[in-house]
Amino acid sequence: MLKPISNYAGLGFLKLVSLLPYKAIVAFGHGLGYIAARAPGERNRVVKTNLRLCFPEFDSVEIDRLSRQHWRLLGRSIAEKSIIWHGSIKKLSKMIEVKSAVDLSSKKPRILVNMHFTGIEGSIILSALAKEKNWPRTSGFFQRMKNPFFNQKIIDWRNRFGGNSIDRQGNSIEIIREIRKGSFIIIAPDIDLGLKDSEFVPFFGIQTNTITAVSRLAKITGAEVCMMTTTLKKDGSGYLCEISKPLENFPGSDPKSDTARLNQCFENEIRLRPAEYYWVHKRFKNRPQGEASPY
């Protein structure tokens, strides 16, 4: 009884937050992050463990500073989800700017490789602007959540502008069909999704379990592969979604080498803005045989 009530209370609260002025939403999010950074708990330990593993050159003072900054930005993005899920196209357009090195209206088979920064999912603005810009619809894999109520709600929110969320489990044929149709295909391979269809490749010098889907799908479909990053603007006024030119000579002959190449691209971006990366995820939870988990 209490769980359904709390689910709907959470939805109502998000709706109320979405009605606030943007600066107020940002300030509220920063407040959430301030509290989270100082609350003892497993995710705080995960953030600091990840930072220590990826930046062994940083002392404890710098790790603590980065951790607090990360939580501040993560709190902001949680509050901004209210706009993503409830805001208008106009409000989204003011918050996210899109810059692309390729013609997004060409409907050429193309995979956009996204990564998990704390900010806004770039896919939502591509969906929101699709009709106005004559862009194809956005499709992408999603990983099921443990809470079935919010699992369905997040699918509904992601699809509210005509997007297409495809369950990662056993739906390769559907994603291949969407690629060949020229839909925007968004894949974020920088989280540990289990050992199936994955390889251990370097990420910050650590052998890291990473899905090989991008390489395999590009080879099957002949799709171009472009990097897509959505990061905070320097003045903090919103986000910039940038789509790169297609990667040269991708895919290569070996999915493992291709996946290592993508991880290096991710690392290069993260080093430019380390506090913005999604450090709350247990990126190194699966380890090569015989190696203990750092968590």
Image (tube, rainbow, N blue to C red):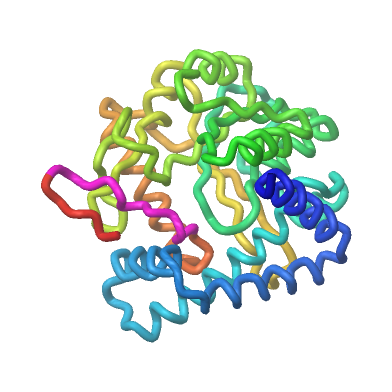
Q: Give the image location of residue 112, x and y in percent.
A: 54, 36
Q: Name which quarter of the figure residue 228 lies in.
A: top right
Quarter of the figure with the N terminus: top right
Residue lying at the far bottom in this picture: please name it. 61
Looking at the image, residue 27 sits to the left or right of residue 217; the answer is right
Is residue 80 positioned above or below 32 on the image?
above
Is residue 116 positioned above or below 258 on the image?
below
Q: Is residue 280 magenta?
A: yes
**Toward the viewer: 172 or 256?**
172
Q: Is residue 19 magenta?
A: no
**Toward the viewer: 53 or 42?**
42
Is residue 176 positioned above or below 22 on the image?
above
Quarter of the figure with the C terminus: bottom left
Q: Name which quarter of the figure residue 104 lies in.
A: top right
**Toward the viewer: 251 or 81?**
81
Q: How many numbered marks appear?
A: 0
> What's the residue at 68%, 25% (across, down)?
106
Q: Give the image location of residue 290, x and y in percent.
A: 11, 47
Q: Is residue 162 visible?
A: yes
**Toward the viewer: 150 or 86?**
150
Q: Give the image location of residue 264, x and y in percent.
A: 35, 50
Looking at the image, residue 54 sits to the left or right of residue 288; the answer is right
> What's the residue at 27%, 25% (across, down)?
253
Q: Give the image location of residue 175, x and y in percent.
A: 53, 20
- Magenta range is 278-289
